[in-house]
Amino acid sequence: ALYSQQNPRVRFHLTESSAENLMDLVRQEKLDMAIVDSTDRDRSLHFRKLKERDFYIAAPEGHPLTQQAYVEPQEVVHIPQVVFNYDVGNSFKEWTTGTPADEAVICTVDTARVALDLVSAGLGITFIPNECVENHPGVRYVPLKNWHQALYMCIYYDKWLEPPVWEFVENLVRSIRESAKENAE
């Protein structure tokens, strides 16, 4: 908000989509920058690693998983799931089993908060990145063993960004990296 007030010429359009869709929008120059969880072999795009995030299982209070110090991904792939980012859900299932396990997905929702509300109501579990872990009534978190996801800034390699936009990008990168350091400590 402060940046927008100080730079009224710069307009923001924030959108959420799959990494592939966001990279296509950057290629088409419909977005100046995207934050994605994968890279592309297309050399027209430039990727800059921002941070790595950890994932947890959010389970209802009293669920047997909440008694464990950590969870192996293979243990939970067939447990009923509430998915709040379908791409993350699919990549998790493919990573753990090699094939999608759609029968475990009860519903797909738009936000982590809604997913946590459904988990606390006993509907299932959800996979949640560390930045979405919050004190939520009726929910307990268990870390997923050895599952991390890197986030990258993606821009069109030869695109010239106006100085105020580039300043914003640099401030965003700095802020994300500082946040990651604080969470690690």
Image (spheres, rainbow, N blue to C red):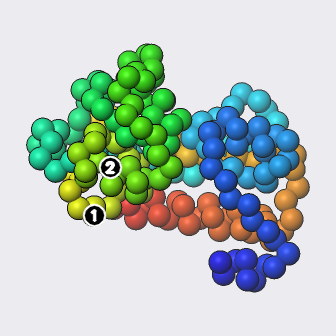
Looking at the rendered structure, the secondary structure element under dot 1 is loop
**Residue type, mark 2 in image:** Leu
**Residue type, mark 1 in image:** Asn
Q: Residue at x 48, y 29 (%)?
A: 90
Count how many numbered circles sit on residues in the image.
Answer: 2
Q: Is residue 130 visible?
A: no
Residue 40 appears in which quarter of the rendering?
top right
Q: Residue 118: which disc?
A: 2
Closer to the camera in the image, 65 or 119: 119
- Residue 70 vs residue 96: left or right? left
Whole-percent x, y for residue 119 in the image: 29, 48
State the quadrant of the C terminus: bottom left
Whole-percent x, y for residue 5 in the image: 73, 83
Is 169 situated above or below 126?
Answer: below
Is 81 situated above or below 98?
Answer: below
Say if mark 1 contacts mark 2, CB within 8 Å: no
Q: Residue 9: which disc?
A: none
Q: Tell me the CA gap for discs 1 and 2.
A: 15 Å
Q: Residue at x 35, y 27 (%)?
A: 104
Give the foreground label among 1 and 2: 2
Whole-percent x, y for residue 51 in the image: 51, 51
Circle 2 crowding by C-alpha within 10 Å: few under 14, some 14–19, many from 20: many
Circle 1 crowding by C-alpha within 10 Å: few under 14, some 14–19, many from 20: few
| Of the image marks 1 and 2, the number of the one nearer the N terminus | 2
Whole-percent x, y for residue 1 in the image: 65, 78
| Residue matched to label 1 | 135
Q: Residue at x 25, y 50 (%)?
A: 121
Residue 38 appears in which quarter of the rendering?
top right
